[in-house]
Structures are given as C-alpha cells and as structure tokens.
Image (cartoon, rainbow, N blue to C red):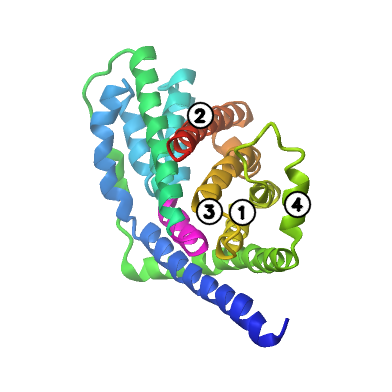
C-alpha cells in the first residue's frame, strides 16, 4: 500500500471526520450553554397533571432541560423533607429522562452524523421514540398509582435561573469543547485506524466465516456488527460509532445493520456504564441506597424502551 492510497483512503477521510465532529461538538456545546432548550419547559404543566405528579416534579422536569444535577437536587431536597414518597421520587426521576435526553441530543446528533451519515437520522429518531415511550409509560404509571393533585406552580423554580450571556456561553462552550474533543479524538482516531487496517487485511472476512458457524441462535445479526457491539461494551459509544463509520465507509455493512448493532450495543453497554458514571454523584445527592434504586429503575426502563423500538424497527425493515 503506497502513501498516496493511504492518504486517500485513510488520512483524508479521518481528517474530514474529525473536522466535522469538531464543528458539531462546538455547536452542540453552545446550544447547551445558551440554555435554548429552556422553552421546552412549557411542556411540564399539562404533563404532570396527566401523571398526577407534584408541582416540584414539574419544576425539576423543567430544570432538567439544562441541568440534570440541579433537577436531581430539587428532587433530593424535597425527598429529604418528606414532600416526596419513595414511589414519587422514582417516578419523578424516570420522568426527567425526557428532558435529560433533549439536553444531550445536540451532542449525540452532531457526533453521530459524521460517523454514519444518513443512518444517524434513523438511529437518533429511534432513541427519541424510546424516550417518548418511556415518558408515556411513566405518565400512565403515575396516573394509575398516584392520587390526583391540586393545581399549582410548575415553572416557578425556573425564575431562579438567569439566562447565560453570549460571552459566558462562549467561554463555557470553549472549555467544554476542549475537554470533550480530546476524549472523542482519543477513541475515534485509533479505532478508525484499527478498523481500516483490519478491513483491508481481510480480518472481518475471517471473522464472518468463523462467527457464522457459531451464531445460529442469532441468524438476524450480521457477524461484522460484532465489532461495533464489542467496542461499545469495552469502551464507549464513540468507539462503537468509530467502528460503525469505518465499516459503513468500506461498504461492509448496510445502514440497517449499523442501526441494529448500535441499538443492541446500547442496550448491552449502557447499564454498567451508567452505574460507573452516575452512581458517584447520584450517591452524593440522594445517598447510596436511593441512588442505587434510581439508577437501577432508570436503566431497566431505558433498556426496555430501546428493546421495544429496536424490535419494531427490525420487523418493519425486514
């Protein structure tokens, strides 16, 4: 393999990918820093009435659009004061999964698009459907398990939050960008290079032939997708995306294969990763016992919703 071919098929595609990711990350961080998702807080009022949730839950829900820690702090304070029962705390924390999803949606979208192109729209749409499905189910549970509540203030706690100035937003965006781009690059560059050379040396062809003899119980799963799932489980979501992007660019997998692999990898990898990243600060806010309970319930709900939308997508596109 000469240098011209290497530059054409590896260096330039990887450089183009990193430029696109950098631009996307900066825009996503700016959106988060400016709190533009705050307008979505208006959804809280009618929704909490349906779910028989208290006003403080609505305030936490609204806060979660731009600060998950602040939202959880509101719940913890009211739980410690006895204003929320164990059941209400769990439902409220699960209810906040929708604004939490929207909080990170810009980053996820702008990271996913450069890796897998048009398939990103389908993947993100499916995860969005899963988030709405979780919310609908939580509202149904609340409506059935909790007594109706009186009318009250939903967004009053938002008045305590001041809008971020452009100067502060840009400063915060640059700080977050520098930290996140280093982490993304540390996964993306080496994994993309590894996948490229593995593919050009026929490794995936060997794996496909070997795996095909041992995956009879999963005939719907393309053997090449194993690497995506493995990278997601062994490392992080960006690692799985890097593997998916390399395989997609090489024409080894279809968009459908990539989407199914990412959903499956998400289902298998998220619970332990969530525990590893969330438990330390959850335990500090809610105390270890409630923290473990909240994380467990959250991951069970998230996994179930992803499995449901994944099965629907698999059946519909078959």
Which is in the foreground here, disc 1 or disc 3? 3
Q: In the rendered structure, does residue 190 fall within the stretch colored magenta? A: no
Q: Which residues are magenta?
A: 104-117
Q: Position of residue 134 (x, y in %)?
A: 42, 31
Q: Is residue 100 visible?
A: no
Q: Residues within 10 Å of mark 2 (few under 14, many from 20)?
A: many
Helix, strand or loop under label 3 = loop
> Distance from label 3 to label 2 (Cα)?
29 Å
Using the image, tell me which numbered label, if any, was put on residue 301: 2
Residue 287 relative to residue 150: left or right: right
Q: Position of residue 262 (x, y in %)?
A: 56, 47
Comes first in the chain, label 3 or label 4:
4
Q: Is residue 134 above or below residue 262?
A: above
The kind of secondary structure the magenta stretch mainly shows is helix
Q: Position of residue 178 (x, y in %)?
A: 54, 69
Q: Residues within 10 Å of mark 1 (few under 14, many from 20)?
A: many
Helix, strand or loop under label 1 = helix
Question: On the image, numbered disc 1 is attached to which residue?
Answer: 240
Question: On the image, numbered disc 4 is attached to which residue?
Answer: 207
Q: Nearer the viewer, residue 161 or 226?
A: 226
> Distance from label 4 to label 1 (Cα)?
17 Å
Q: Residues within 10 Å of mark 3 (few under 14, many from 20)?
A: some
Comes first in the chain, label 4 or label 1:
4
The answer to whether marks 3 and 4 mark residues whose Cβ atoms lie closer than 8 Å is: no
Question: On the image, numbered disc 3 is attached to which residue?
Answer: 254
């Amino acid at each position: 393999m000469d240098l011209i071919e290497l530059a054409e098929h590896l260096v330039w595609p990887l450089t183009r990918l990193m430029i696109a990711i950098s631009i996307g990350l900066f825009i996503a961080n700016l959106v988060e820093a400016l709190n533009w998702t705050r307008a979505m807080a208006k959804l809280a009022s009618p929704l909490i009435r349906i779910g028989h949730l208290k006003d403080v839950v609505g305030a936490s829900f609204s806060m979660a659009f731009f600060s998950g820690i602040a939202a959880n702090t509101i719940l913890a304070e009211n739980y410690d004061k006895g204003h929320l029962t164990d059941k209400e705390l769990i439902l409220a924390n699960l209810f906040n999964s929708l604004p939490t999803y929207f909080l990170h949606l810009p980053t996820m979208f702008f990271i996913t698009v450069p890796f897998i192109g048009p398939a990103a729209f389908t993947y993100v749409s499916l995860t969005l459907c899963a988030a709405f499905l979780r919310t609908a189910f939580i509202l149904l549970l609340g409506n059935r398990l909790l007594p109706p509540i009186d009318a009250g203030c939903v967004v009053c706690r938002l008045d305590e939050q001041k809008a971020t100035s452009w100067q502060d937003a840009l400063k915060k965006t640059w700080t977050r960008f520098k930290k996140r781009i280093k982490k993304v690059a540390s996964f993306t560059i080496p994994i993309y290079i590894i996948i490229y050379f593995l593919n050009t040396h026929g490794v995936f062809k060997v794996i496909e032939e070997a795996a095909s003899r041992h995956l009879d119980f999963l005939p719907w799963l393309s053997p090449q997708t194993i690497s995506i799932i493995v990278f997601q489980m062994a490392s992080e979501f960006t690692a799985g995306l890097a593997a998916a992007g390399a395989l997609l660019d090489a024409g080894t997998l279809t968009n459908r294969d990539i989407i199914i692999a990412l959903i499956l990898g998400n289902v298998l990898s998220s619970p332990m990763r969530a525990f590893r990243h969330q438990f330390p600060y959850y335990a500090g806010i809610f105390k270890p016992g409630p923290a473990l309970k909240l994380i467990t319930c959250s991951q069970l709900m998230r996994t179930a919703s992803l499995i449901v939308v994944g099965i629907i997508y698999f059946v519909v596109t078959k």
